[in-house]
Image (cartoon, rainbow, N blue to C red):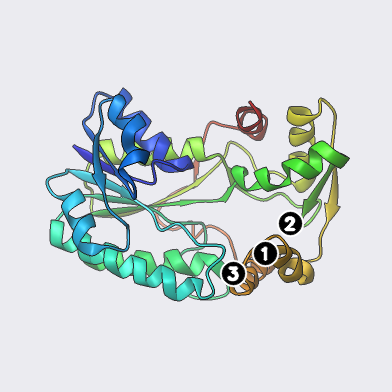
Amino acid sequence: MFAVAGVTGNTGSVVARELLAAGQAVRVIVRDAAKGEAWKARGADVAVAQLDDAVALARALDGVKGAYLLSPPSVTSSDPLTESRSQVDAMARAVAASAVPHVVFLSSIAAHHPDRTGPILTVHYAEQKLSAAARDVTFVRPSYFLENWRSAFAAVKGDGVLPSFLQPGRAFPMVATEDIGRVAAERLLAGPAGRQVVELTGPEDYTPEAIARALGNALLGREAHVVPLPVEQAEPILTSLGVSPAMAALYREMYTSFHTGHVDFERRGGAVVRGKVGAEAAFAAMAA
């Protein structure tokens, strides 16, 4: 049996779906039993545990041969780094106590850096803690999520414009969560192999202009246009949308490091894995 967290979100749902399709027994980890009902109907076992509850999480991991874990950020937290580290500490205790043979953890591009990466610092810390706690661990480090552009759907639909903190004319690595979940499931099925890092991106890199074209085609049937947003304006813009000041500052730091090239793949020990789902297909699925 495999345990899967995050099944109410984008990547965990794909992991659980892929494992079930492969004929594997799956235990989904949810905060509320009601959120597991749909998975129970599909044949999955359901464990109720908060990711920051080491005792409950250890019970959920007991007896499984592999687990998919993640540490989702809280965009409204007044102290997101401390909050995330507390959750990761509990997760590491649960992993050690349960002696789960293999953990696949959702990390991020640039997680090898100890500074100047904004919210990515949370998974840098997680990689350190889980490397010490897990018997075998695989860190999946995806690039910028194509799903992050979902927040711009209203602007594209309403005005035919795509606001972007990413630099126009520059191609950035991006990936669909469908690919992330599929690769994570494949790594679980492959079994333990020591400490591994899988750097993952989509079939091609995209400029903001290419994203605008793909979004426009998916949502409008015509091309949308990029409206560049200065990184210096990230904090006031994001806080106006309900993001906490602390998290907005982290996002500003991350976008700045995208521009300088600091947020990039480590490219250590092998080539970056390319996924299968391009922007057009990802946005069409989101718009459906």
Question: Where residue 146 sits in the image (x, y, percent)?
Answer: 61, 43
- Residue under the point 57% across and 69% down: 118
- Residue under the point 55% across and 51% down: 143
Which quadrant holds residue 182? top left
- Residue under the point 52% across and 69% down: 77
CB within 8 Å, label 2 to label 1: yes
Which quadrant of the rendered structure holds the N terminus? top left
Name the outermost residue toward the front: 34
Q: Indicate left or right for 193 with 30 as reference.
A: left
Q: Nearer the viewer, residue 50 or 2?
A: 50
Using the image, tell me which numbered label, if any, was put on residue 116: none
According to the image, label 1 marks what residue? 255
Residue 134 visible in the snapshot: no
In the figure, 51 relative to 62: above or below? Answer: below
Kind of residue at badge 2 = Leu
Q: Earlier in the sequence, mark 3 or mark 1?
A: 3
Question: Where residue 209 sits in the image (x, y, percent)?
Answer: 80, 43
Q: Nearer the viewer, residue 29 or 139?
A: 29
Distance from the alpha carbon under mark 2 to that under mark 1: 7 Å
Circle 3 packing at 10 Å, graded few (<14), some (14-19), many (20+), is: many
Q: Secondary structure at mark 1?
A: helix
According to the image, label 2 marks what residue? 166
Q: Nearer the viewer, residue 65 or 79?
A: 79
Which quadrant holds residue 167? bottom right
According to the image, label 3 marks what residue? 247
In the figure, 79 relative to 266: above or below? Answer: below
Q: Indicate left or right for 258 with 213 as reference.
A: left
